[in-house]
Amino acid sequence: MYPTTVALIDDDPEYAEYLAQHLSGQGMSVDVYRDSRDLLAATDAYDYDFYLVDLMLPGIDGVELIKVLRKRSNAGVLVVSGRLAPDVFRQVVDAGADMYLAKPVQFEQVVLAIQAVQRRVGSGAPAQTPWKFDRRARQLVAPDGVRVDLSDADVLVLECFAQAEGGTVTRETLRQRLGREPDAAGTDGLNAIIYRLRRRIERATPSLVPLQSRSRVGYVFRAPLVTL
């Protein structure tokens, strides 16, 4: 049982290259990032099926990166690092990692660890508690009951997600609903609207934010969404 897409975040170019080749040989599609900021700047940063994270990284370190990922993804997270500290295991587990391997480590051990974590991810979690879109109150209600106030643009976006019933909403659909067209630079402002909505949700509730992008296609609300 392997994930389809893997983000490998490690600043050791030789190690990352050979590990990526080994994982690709197992049928996984691997993207390598040598700086945590490069991953976070990617359009599909939170859409990978699995994350392999080093702890000593340019940008924000691995522990902080895992905390950011856990805000928006329930994907498997495996730490493979040479950091030696008495509390390193507790730090990565508290941050949200599923497993920790200490370097040096054989590539086959990494593969076995990925399989073990992936069994947890794909084993069939309990049915998700739905989010609720309260049109009259102009609020999004998280599974923990927290209410998130919505802007005019947010309301239009949530209406698209509710109609899609878990499917991908294309950028063109959102542009039409919002009355936006790309400017001279080719930007339409959709990324900024989704980013602000995500941040508003993250500040209000610790619940996993279900908003995800679909590279060059659109966005999806990956949780049950009930309209009130």
Image (cartoon, rainbow, N blue to C red):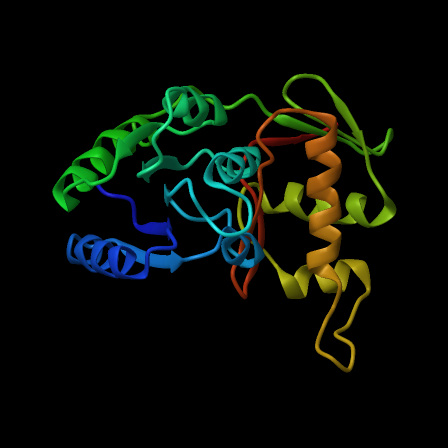
Q: Nearer the viewer, residue 139 or 39?
A: 39
| Residue 51 position in % (x across, y down) | 38, 43
Q: Residue at x 34, y 50 (%)?
A: 6
Q: Nearer the viewer, residue 95 or 115?
A: 95
Q: Residue at x 60, y 47 (%)?
A: 164
In the image, taking residue 113 as reference, residue 172 lies left or right, namely right
| Residue 101 position in % (x across, y down) | 26, 32
In the image, taking residue 172 as reference, residue 65 lies left or right, namely left
Q: From the viewer's perspective, is residue 66 above or below residue 33?
A: above
| Residue 214 position in % (x across, y down) | 52, 56
Q: Which residue is drawn at 22% across and 34% down?
A: 113
Q: Which residue lies furthest to the bottom in this view?
A: 184
In the image, taking residue 19 as reference, residue 144 lies left or right, namely right
| Quadrant of the drawing holding the N terminus | top left
Q: Residue at x 38, y 26 (%)?
A: 85
Q: From the viewer's perspective, is residue 116 above or below residue 186?
A: above
| Residue 42 position in % (x across, y down) | 53, 59
In the image, taking residue 91 as reference, residue 194 lies left or right, namely right
Q: Quadrant of residue 202?
A: top right
Q: Residue furthest front?
A: 85
How many marks the image carries: the answer is: 0
| Quadrant of the drawing holding the C terminus | top right
